[in-house]
Amino acid sequence: MSRLHVHAWGPAGGRPLLVLHGVTNTGARYRRLAEEQLPGMRVIAPDLRGHGSSTWDPPWSVARHVADVAETLAEAGLGPVAAAGHSFGGLIGTSLAAARPDLVERLALIDPAVALAPSRAAEEAEASRRDEGWASVAEARAARRAIRPEPARDTVEEDLATHLEEGGDGRWRFRFSRPAAVTAWGEMAGPVPSLAGYPGRVLLIVAGRADIVTDALRAGLRADLGDRLREETIDAGHMLFWDAPGELGGVLRGFLA
């Protein structure tokens, strides 16, 4: 039985779209994209293990995440479904399509973090491990607003309300397991999962102002998928679902049509 908490938007009978979030994130962050950009679809966004309101129990391996997502779809009576994965969620989505192609009708990879340079993954893992949070909600608000582009700053309040909590030490942090995040960064330095046996189409969406998508990922996808792979670039930062929701929504609607 899956122990993932699931966020869902759209009509119960709408076409389902599974959305997988990135490391340190939560499925709740896709509400705006779902409601404003994907009308008529039933968007299902679980909190991955170690994140949000899902279980934080280990293991936090890619294989365990894939099993969790497969169990969540089975409980909902869904599959095959269209799937989209952002950042670490792109690795989970690719691994799900590789291991369970019967569950993934088509796959959109939103600035996926796959086959990262080990040095980068180690640096990010260390930052997650050392996360000291903020002394107050006001300090967290100021820090989050400072890293969002002006058009996306209105996302901060909802994010703090749904994802921030006070720890036993009086510091405020986002609700995710630090060990799970460290493990995830290690997994993102691994090889590209093979989609040689996956029969569906894949859309690779690159954030033009980020430096996440690797040449190794591109090469692996091209070798496995050939003309079933399409690539689109959006001129925005890594958090495309906040920073460029209209552009991302348009690309996804075209792919899902």
Image: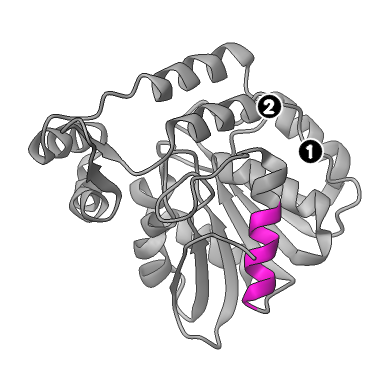
**Alpha carbons under labels 2 and 1: distance apart:** 9 Å
Query: What's drawn in magenta, residue-wise?
Result: 67-76
Are the residues tagged 2 and 1 within 8 Å (C-beta)? no
Give the SS element for disc 2.
loop
Q: Residue 174, how many percent across, how many down?
A: 31, 41
Q: Main secondary structure of the magenta part?
A: helix
Q: Residue 208, how many percent across, how many down?
A: 48, 34
Q: Residue drawn 49% across and 52% down?
A: 55
Q: Residue 211, how many percent across, how many down?
A: 51, 25
Mark 1, residues whose alpha carbon is within 10 Å: few (<14), some, or many (≥20)?
Answer: many
Number of the label disc, if any, that sits on residue 69: none
Is residue 188 visible in the rendered image? The answer is yes
Q: Nearer the viewer, residue 55 or 121?
A: 55
Relative to 91, say whether 16 is above or below.
below
Q: In this figure, which residue is indicated by the disc labeled 2?
A: 115
Q: In this figure, which residue is indicated by the disc labeled 1?
A: 193
Mark 2, residues whose alpha carbon is within 10 Å: few (<14), some, or many (≥20)?
Answer: many
Q: Residue drawn 25% across and 46% down?
A: 164
**Between discs 2 and 1, the one toward the N terminus:** 2
Q: Quadrant of residue 224?
A: top right
Residue 147 in magenta stretch: no
Relative to 16, say whether 203 is above or below.
above
Residue sitting at the far bottom = 13
Relative to 150, say whether 256 is above or below.
below
Is residue 74 left or right of 111 when viewed as pictured? right
Three-letter code for the amino acid on which mark 2 is drawn? Ala
Q: Nearer the viewer, residue 224 or 233?
A: 224
Three-letter code for the amino acid on which mark 1 is drawn? Pro
Q: Residue 237, how many percent across, how many down?
A: 40, 36
Q: Quadrant of the N terminus?
A: bottom right
Q: Quadrant of residue 59?
A: top right
